[in-house]
Image (spheres, rainbow, N blue to C red):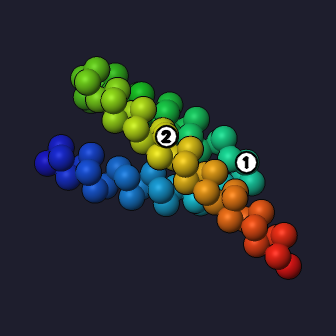
Amino acid sequence: MIYVLVWVILPITVVLTSILFSILTKKWFVMPIITFLILSFLMVTIFNTTFFIWVALFTILSLAVSFLRLFIRKLVLNYR
């Protein structure tokens, strides 16, 4: 069950919420910080310290999605 969470549910959730929060806040750094804080809290309360690797990976994924969304937004606005 933990593998389904780590390999399927969390990546999809991180990507979708990163896109949503970057659209709502118009800031690229909000969702990576929120992702790091929430997953760090889950690591301390539910999982063990080996989950920190996943915390770092999902934070990087959130950062990449936020930058990609910002880049696509700037490209679209420049071509109008």
The reply to whether residue 53 is visible in this rendering is: yes
Question: Mark 1: few, some, or many residues within 10 Å (few <14, many ≥20)?
Answer: few
Horizontal arrangement in the rendering, residue 36 relative to residue 6 (left or right): right
Helix or strand or loop: what does disc 1 sit on? loop
Badge 2 crowding class, 10 Å Cα cut-off, few under 14, some 14 to 19, many 20 or more, is: some
**Residue at 49% of width from left, 40% of height from top?**
60
At label 2, the amino acid type is Ile
Residue 42 in the image: state x and y as whole percent.
Answer: 35, 32
**Residue at the farthest left position:** 1
Give the mark toward the camera: 2 or 1.
Answer: 2
> Can the viewer see residue 18?
no
The front one of 22 and 42 is: 22
Vertical order, 17 against 75 (above or below): above
User: Residue 60: which numbered mark, if any?
Assistant: 2
- Residue 79, relative to residue 55: is it above or below? below
Quarter of the figure with the C terminus: bottom right
Q: Residue at x 61, y 57 (%)?
A: 68
Report the residue at 63% width, 51% height from top.
67
The residue carrying mark 1 is 27
Image spot of residue 12 (x, y percent):
39, 58
Q: Is residue 76 left or right of residue 54?
A: right
Q: Position of residue 41 (x, y in %)?
A: 41, 28
Q: Secondary structure at mark 2?
A: helix
Residue at 82%, 76% in the rendered image: 79
The residue closer to the viewer here, 10 or 74, is 74
Q: Earlier in the sequence, mark 2 or mark 1?
A: 1
| x, y percent for residue 2 | 18, 43
Disc 2 and disc 1: Cα gap in Å? 16 Å
